Each structure stands twice: as C-alpha cells, then as structure tokens.
Image (tube, rainbow, N blue to C red):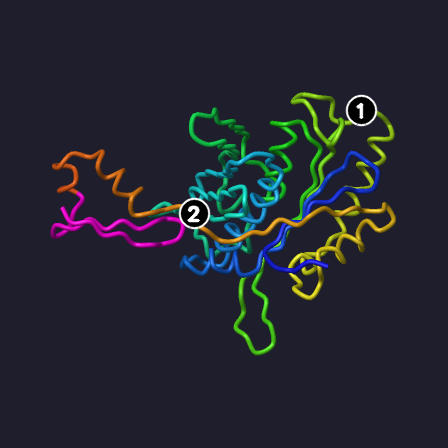
Amino acid sequence: MTSTDDIILPFQVGNTTIRGRLVRLGPAINEILSRHDYEDPLSMLVGETAALVAMLGASLKFDGKLILQMQGDGPVSMVVADYTVGGALRATSTTPETHEWKIEDAKGPELHYLLRKGHMVMTIDQGADMERYQGVTPLEGATVAEGAVNYFKQSEQIPTAIKLAIGKVSRPGEEPEWRAGGIMVQFMPGDGGTRERGEAELLKVQDQDEWDNASAKLATTQLDELLDPTLTPEELLYRLYHEDNVMVYETLPVHFECTCAREKVAAVLEQSTDAELQEIAKDGVIDVTCDFCKEKYEFKV
C-alpha cells in the first residue's frame, strides 16, 4: 500500500494493451496554489492542469521535461504546467489586464469559459542540444480532461480517457488544503505498450471490446474518490478494475519545485543594454518576480 499523497501510480488493465496512470497531489498542489492569489475557479484550473501534466510526464523514458500550455482569449490568457523526470512539478497562469468576462463568474475550472478559444500545446524538452517535440491542437472541450482527450485524438491518434478532480479538503483539526487527483487510461498497441505515430487506433474487435470496458469503468470514477486521502490509489484501482486483474507498478514521487534562480535571472538581464536596464529600473533597482513560485529577486543598476 502506498502513500495517498504526491505520487503517480502506473498500472495496466489485466493482460491487455491498455495502460494507465493515477495521480494524487496533496502538499505539492497546495504549495503551488498557495503561492498565488487566484480566484477559486482559476486555482482549480491550474490544479487540474498540474495533475494532468504529472500523469502525462510520468510516461517519459528519459531525462527531460513535459510542458503543457493552454492559451486562449478568455479572462485567462494562459495556463502552463511542467513536470520534470524525477518528480518536480510547477504551474502558473497569466490573465489579461481587462476582459469583459470575469474569472469569479465561472462555476469551476470551465475550460470553455476561462480560456474560451485557443490552443493546447504539449512540448517534450529532452534537454540541451536535443530536438524538442511539440504538438499543437485547437482547445476543445468544456474541461481540461476533455481538452486533453481531444488533443490525443487529433495529434497522436491514441484513444484516451481521463478524469480529473480538484478541491479543498479538511482533515480533523486542520485548515482546508488543496488536493488534486486524476486517472487516465490509453490504448497502447504493440510490444510493451509502444506504438508508432499514426498507427491504427483500434486494430481488431477484441481491442475495441477491451477499450470500451476500460474506458467505461474509468468513467464511473467519482471525483471525491480521486481526492479522498483515506482511500489509497490501489484501493481505487481495485474498485474499478478488480474483475480485469489490474496490475500496478512502482509509484513515482511528485513534489513542488521551481527551477528559477538568481543566476538565471541575471543572465537574462545581462542581455539588455544599460539604457534598457535603466528604463525598467525604479530608483536604481530592478525587481523580478518568478511567475511560478513568486520568489523575488532584486538587482541594483
């Protein structure tokens, strides 16, 4: 039995080519969201995005980073989250100065309201001197989960089902804290669950039956099951797939970590001319705040 907090649990639905991952975020997502003064609908949107990128990034088989970015023309202009192999997770958002629609009027993490029309971009960064892979699709769907399913359908042709949850949970005697969770399954034909881009989605009748079974059972997942700290990930998977002999693999840890550093900010500023630095300085000081962690850096010019 694993911890219920800040882990990703890979699994396989019996002896099929259907693979999945389940994520539970406790202190990590609370740390991410507590550093920002977001309205609740935006906190929920950022939290679901972070849970999603953690599940997706856990599939990387090499040192690198998965960056998930959603851009739109709504009261939220961008949400971005990234997951680095090893478990580092962070997320943030940007909003336009003015917009006719108000974030607080959203009923929750409504993708079609908060971001409206735009794009979903997934980038795999394999590090310095390595080529990046990037996929871009129109932003479609009412939720982050629906948007991701549409991305895989259009960009990768991988049948995918996803459930995401975000909310504040109170433990006895403690203040409410943010928690997030998610579960996904994908049809991954080929040896070891690998596939070639553009490969036929479902190869035979048996594939279709197995996929219909797995995706239908995932759809029965209740949002509170994804957030409940007293319900272990294994117990939830047993509820869903015990008839299919679900198999779980080694869990992967997740933690909040920002990659910003004073040296990195200084290197960016050094690319500007003295005149440009003087223009952005106030009383001879340049203040820089990291969008992700809100760490403040001060430089005298």
Image side of residue 165 versus residue 103, left or right = right
Numbered tag placed on residue 203 in the rendering: 1
- Which residue: 36% across, 46% down? 260
Circle 2: residue type:
Ser
Q: Nearer the viewer, residue 141 or 295?
A: 295
Closest to the camera, between mark 1 and mark 2, is 1
Disc 1 to disc 2, C-alpha distance: 40 Å
Q: Is residue 40 above or below residue 10?
A: below
Numbered tag placed on residue 93 in the rendering: 2
Image side of residue 163 versus residue 118, left or right = right
Which of the two labelled residues, at mark 1 and mark 2, occupies the earlier sequence position? 2
- Which residue: 43% across, 47% down? 93
Q: Is residue 284 magenta?
A: yes
Q: Is residue 301 above or below residue 180?
A: above
- Dot 2, crowdedness within 10 Å: few (<14), some or many (≥20)? many
| Image marks 1 and 2: residues in contact by CB distance under 8 Å | no
Circle 1: residue type:
Leu
Counting from the top left corner in percent of width and height, residue 289 is at: 31, 51
Extent of the magenta region: 280-301
What is the secondary structure assignment of the residue under circle 1?
loop
Q: Is residue 237 above or below residue 201?
A: below
Counting from the top left corner in percent of width and height, residue 199 is at: 71, 21
- Which residue: 40% across, 59% down? 37
What is the secondary structure assignment of the residue under circle 2?
strand
Q: Nearer the viewer, residue 102 or 38?
A: 38
Image side of residue 96 versus residue 109, left or right = left
Q: Is residue 87 magenta?
A: no
Q: Nearer the viewer, residue 205 or 258?
A: 258
Give the quadrant of the N terminus: bottom right
